[in-house]
Image: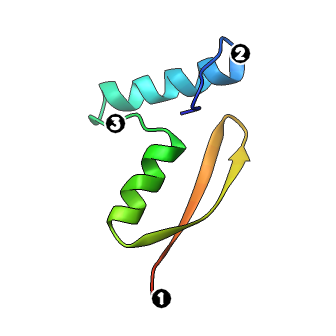
């Protein structure tokens, strides 16, 4: 989820996808910063983030591996 959501069609597409995940399997919407915090708390280090269309790929690596 973008930190600041706009009415852009790309942001709306992301929001609708997230809403479907919330509605179906009970997922949770998170921003990149929230994923980073969760990763650090569980022993992972941020590697990078890449935009892939209306989605993002966020990479982490286990610390010490």
Q: Is residue 5 left or right of residue 38?
A: right
The label on residue 28 is 3
Mark 2 or mark 3: whose residue is earlier in sequence: 2
> Where 44 falls versus 6 (above or below)?
below
Task: Report which quarter residue 51 is drawn in.
Answer: top right
CA–CA distance in space, label 2 to label 1: 39 Å
Residue at the far bottom in the pictured view: 65
CA–CA distance in space, label 2 to label 3: 22 Å
Q: Is residue 30 left or right of residue 46?
A: left
Q: Give SS at disc 3.
A: loop
Disc 3 crowd, CA 10 A, few/some/many (<14, 14-19, 20+): few
Mark 2 or mark 1: whose residue is earlier in sequence: 2
The label on residue 8 is 2
The label on residue 26 is none
Is 65 or 15 nearer to us in this picture? 65
Q: Which residue is mark 1?
A: 65
Q: Is residue 44 left or right of residue 24?
A: right
CA–CA distance in space, label 1 to label 3: 28 Å
């Amino acid at each position: 989820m973008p930190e600041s959501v706009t009415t852009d069609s790309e942001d709306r597409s992301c929001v609708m996808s997230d809403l479907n995940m919330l509605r179906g399997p009970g997922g949770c919407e998170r921003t990149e910063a929230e994923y980073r915090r969760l990763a650090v708390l569980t022993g992972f280090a941020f590697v990078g983030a890449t935009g892939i269309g209306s989605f993002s790929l966020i990479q982490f690596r286990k610390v010490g591996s």
